[in-house]
Image (spheres, helix red, strand yellow):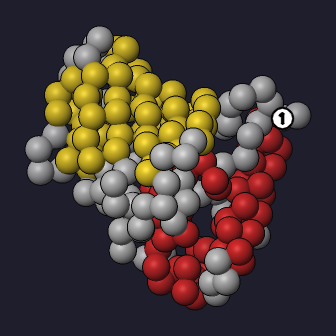
């Protein structure tokens, strides 16, 4: 399968998952669009597979749906998904772990140098943990980001606005863990 046709099938699968999640919560297109602060037409195009979702849009929708990001991402092949692309971040879901206390997602992450991505608050109690392999990352709460060199790790509350960027002219290679407590209410 070509990369273009594979991307189309992933886009369609994400759209189908979003539609099922919305319907399971008995939300109209208008209501979910309002809660996620995106246009109704954008949501309609995403659900029908006519629009490729950005990482930021998927986070807005899954937060409004009160589910982890991985609930909207289809599994492709053996244990990995396609990369999700944001303003500065490329993320590949590697694994999802569910237990009685939390859902934990593990991502392979690249932060592109010269770019900055601001993520809105996720659900209450959600935390993010980053381990840097290469490059220097500037991540964490927008009001007090952490500077992490290769080999360093850091954690921050993701239920506040948080950022991803780099120092220098090198991309960052990292692993990101996102922990969603079971039953956490959604930030609105």
From the viewer's perspective, is 146 left or right of 66?
left
Rendered position, 93 above or below 30: above
Q: Residue at x 82, y 44 (%)?
A: 5
Q: Quadrant of residue 22?
A: bottom right
Placement of the C terminus among the 4 image quadrants: bottom left
Q: Outermost residue, top direction? A: 151
Residue 85 visible in the snapshot: no
Judged from this view, the residue extending furthest toward the front is 100
Direction from residue 168 to residue 8 in the image, left or right: right
Quadrant where the N terminus sits is top right
With respect to residue 15, does 170 lie above or below? Answer: above
Residue 100 percent across, percent down from the top left: 55, 46
Residue 72 falls in image quadrant:
bottom right
Disc 1 packing (10 Å; few <14; some 14–19; many ≥20): few
The residue lying furthest to the left in this view is 144
Camera-side residue of 57 and 101: 101
Q: Secondary structure at mark 1?
A: loop
Residue sitting nearer the eye, 126 or 130: 126
Residue located at (54% from left, 52% from top): 69
Residue labelled with disc 1: 2
Residue occupying image coordinates x 55% and y 86%: 31
Tell me where residue 10 appears, x and y as whole percent.
75, 48
* Rendered view: 15 above or below 75: below
* Residue lying at 72% horizontally and 46% vertically, measured from the top left: 74
Rendering coords of residue 178 (x, y %):
43, 41
Image x and y of residue 170, in percent: 31, 20
Nearest the camera: 187 or 33? 187
Q: Is residue 105 visible to us here?
A: yes
| Left or right placement of residue 67 versus residue 158 in this view | right
Quadrant housing residue 153: top left
């Amino acid at each position: 399968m070509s990369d273009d046709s594979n991307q189309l099938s992933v886009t369609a699968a994400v759209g189908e998952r979003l539609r099922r999640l919305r319907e399971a919560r008995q939300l109209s297109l208008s209501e979910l669009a309002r809660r996620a602060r995106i246009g109704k037409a954008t949501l309609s195009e995403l659900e029908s597979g006519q629009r490729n979702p950005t990482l930021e849009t998927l986070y807005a929708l899954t937060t409004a749906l009160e589910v982890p990001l991985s609930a909207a991402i289809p599994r492709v092949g053996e244990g990995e998904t396609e990369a999700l692309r944001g303003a500065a971040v490329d993320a590949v879901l590697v694994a999802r772990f569910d237990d009685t206390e939390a859902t934990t997602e593990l991502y392979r992450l690249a932060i592109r140098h010269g770019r900055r991505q601001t993520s809105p608050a996720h659900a209450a109690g959600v935390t993010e943990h980053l381990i840097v392999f290469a490059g220097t990352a500037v991540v964490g709460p927008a009001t007090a980001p952490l500077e992490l060199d290769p080999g360093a790790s850091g954690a921050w509350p993701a239920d506040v606005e948080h950022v991803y960027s780099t120092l220098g002219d090198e991309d960052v290679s990292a692993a990101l863990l996102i922990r969603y407590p079971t039953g956490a209410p959604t930030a609105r």
